[in-house]
Amino acid sequence: MIIQLLLSVIVGVIKTAISLMPQVAIPDWVVSAGDAVRTVMASAGGFAYWVPLALGVKVAATVMAVLAAGFLIRVGRMILSFFTGGGGS
Amino acid sequence: MRRSRVFSQWLHGTLAVGVLSFLIVTGMVAQAGPAQAAAVPQTTTTIYPDVLVDDPQFNPWSCPWTLITCLWDDGGFMPKDTGSDQWVAPPGAGGGAGGSSSGSWGPVPYAGAAGSASGNDQSKVTLDGIAAVSRETSPGSGIFQFGYTITARNNSSVTSASATWWAFYTCRNNSSGAYSTILVNHGISMGTAAYNTTPAQYCPAGTAMTGVMTSNKVPPVADPPRNYPYADFGGYADQMQTQVKYKVLLDCVTAAGDPNNTMDDTVTSYTVDYTGVKGGFVYPSCQSRDPQSHYGGAKWQFTMPGDFTYRDMMVNKPDRSSYPPACFYDGCPLKVRYRGSDCMAGSIPCAEWTKSRQTDPSSYTCWWGAQQRGIDKCFVLERAYQLVAVKSTHANTDGDPSTGDSGTGSTGGSTGGSSGGGGGVPPTVSIPTTSPNDPGGDDGSCFPSGLAVLNPVEWVLRPIRCALTWAFVPSGSFFPDLSLDLSGAWQDSAPGKWVGALSGITNGLTVSDGECWGPSFTLPGQFGGTIDLQDKLCSEPVIAARNIAYAGMSALLVIGGVLTCVRLLGSSVGYSTGGGS
């Protein structure tokens, strides 16, 4: 009961936060972009034996992930900067 | 000071005893009811046969090709509006045909024209219309006729043109239910005048036509294999100048659920003319081996010129999520949808969807391609979305997660057997269930019974265990309900929708291994058609040079990626690796 209560409260907070996000219609081109990407990758696949395309995709994905992580780190640093924790003259 | 510490210790101890007493009392109250239910209830569960095998109304022929029409139970044809493919209903068509649109079907695949060097120049012949209709030759005769009309146009400057129009139709045996596939390979030969013909095809006596399918499309080389028993060599054939052999390893899933009943069939020795017509072959039918079986996938192999060692060409094995419908890739699989979204393996609302559905039935629907089916049709996918792969053709197709391979052995065996019967009366089995509030061990009661009443320890431990269980162990349905609630809120939210849409893009970022001869090129007609680089690119020393270049490019990619990542991370923490003063 106690665990349930705690988790229910946490989930309620998360749901409230999610519900506050504005609804923005997803453009059709975003929805259909997956097909276009598949078409491009299928065409590029013919060169895969000669060019390390799969590795390139993985490297690009890793760089994008690091970029996102760096952004989060920057945001975290910004937030932490509001809390000086003392010091100064 | 000392007095205050003693008081503090007394206070903490009192509070602890008070809380514990409260938990014990409330726990005993909460557990008192269920604990008295000593008898274990029996649940009767119906075992469903494998209802999805070759459903005549939803023949899995659809997907990349255009399903012209389906024969429904009432014997009439229901033409399918194919949108851009533009179905053209025949004038005066009977049999319930309805709906029409006009326009050209576009170039005919595998068209050629005399006077041109190119073997497959689709610009030469345009298909202006295809109309098909099927009906019984006479009411009650049981003999079905498939009639079609082809209208083609030679739009080239040459004096004659030829094309081939292919169609397939299926006939279902009225008594055994077995299907047969019949290929219509219609050659078109025309002059400058328009071509128009209306031949007819028949299903054998005692069989009923269940569907007709055709296409005006030439599947691209990289197109996934189609979901019909036909192997189109496509661009691969163009790359072969000499005799090669093709082999199809066909997986037939038997009605008993055996997904590995492999039919190894060497189809033919196949000769491809460099400038000739592409070819293909019709798969051997799974139903010819076992009328109750269905198509579970196939692997194509071919031999290289001069080297008759079979190599994998394509593997058309449906993945677990689309099993057992005979669909390749995402063509027309049977899927469970949770609140409108396809279930994915491992997703929280779907992993135990048959169980979750009991408390939230409206959120789960069953789909066969674009058609919604009764939820019972999806019971065969009972375990298809569990994170740990479990083939849905296992014995557990009863829609009850509590009946697994282990623990209820009689269940598994009876299911497989019933499927083999192919639609008999569903058997029933009795499955013992346990009390969901059993706090563990013993009989789950909060107070001792029998000889245990003489043990004073039992009078302490059991109430405490009950109380702690009540306080800290969530109920069995709590986490599934909570995850359903949270995942539903996420999927309905703007970020959830965006993540879903963007995941479609990222899912497309897959690259095949490729082949040494690279992609297929087709030059304009005056340059002589397809270029075949296989002999030049797939031999030494080109391969050795390729290996060196490939390793170099891979190293550059890795080094560049690592440096970029280091720089990005460094800049995010205020460390700059760049120059500057």
Image (cartoon, helix red, strand yellow):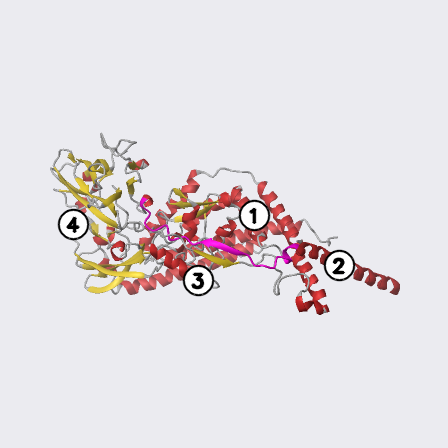
Quadrant for the N terminus of chain B, please. bottom right
Q: CA distance from mark 1 to mark 3?
A: 37 Å
Magenta stretch: dominant SS? loop
Q: Tell me the mark number nearer the camera, choosing from 4 and 1.
A: 1
Which label's residue is closer to the chain start, 4 or 1? 4
Task: Mark 1 and mark 3 in contact? Answer it, CB < 8 Å.
Answer: no
Which label's residue is closer to the chain start, 3 or 2? 2
- Chain bearing tag 3 is B
Q: Is residue B66 left or right of residue B427?
A: left
Q: Residue at x 85, y 61 (%)?
A: B7
Residue for badge 1: B486
Using the rendered view, name the quadrant where residue B93 is placed.
top left
Q: Nearer the viewer, residue A56 or B86?
A: B86
Q: CA distance from mark 3 to mark 4?
A: 58 Å
Q: Nearer the viewer, residue B250 or B41?
A: B41
The relative height of residue B149 versus residue B574 in the rendered view (above or below) is above
Residue for badge 3: B410
Q: Amino acid at mark 3?
A: Ser
Q: Tell me the mark number nearer the camera, choosing from 1 and 3.
A: 3
Q: Residues within 10 Å of mark 4 (few under 14, many from 20)?
A: some
Q: Amino acid at mark 1?
A: Leu
Residue for badge 4: B276
Q: Which residues are magenta?
A: B33-56
Task: Mark 3 and mark 2 in contact? Answer it, CB < 8 Å.
Answer: no
Task: Mark 4 and mark 1 in contact? Answer it, CB < 8 Å.
Answer: no
- Chain bearing tag 2 is B
Circle 2 SS class:
helix
The relative height of residue B218 versus residue B244 in the rendered view (above or below) is above
Q: Position of residue B544 (x, y in %)?
A: 29, 65
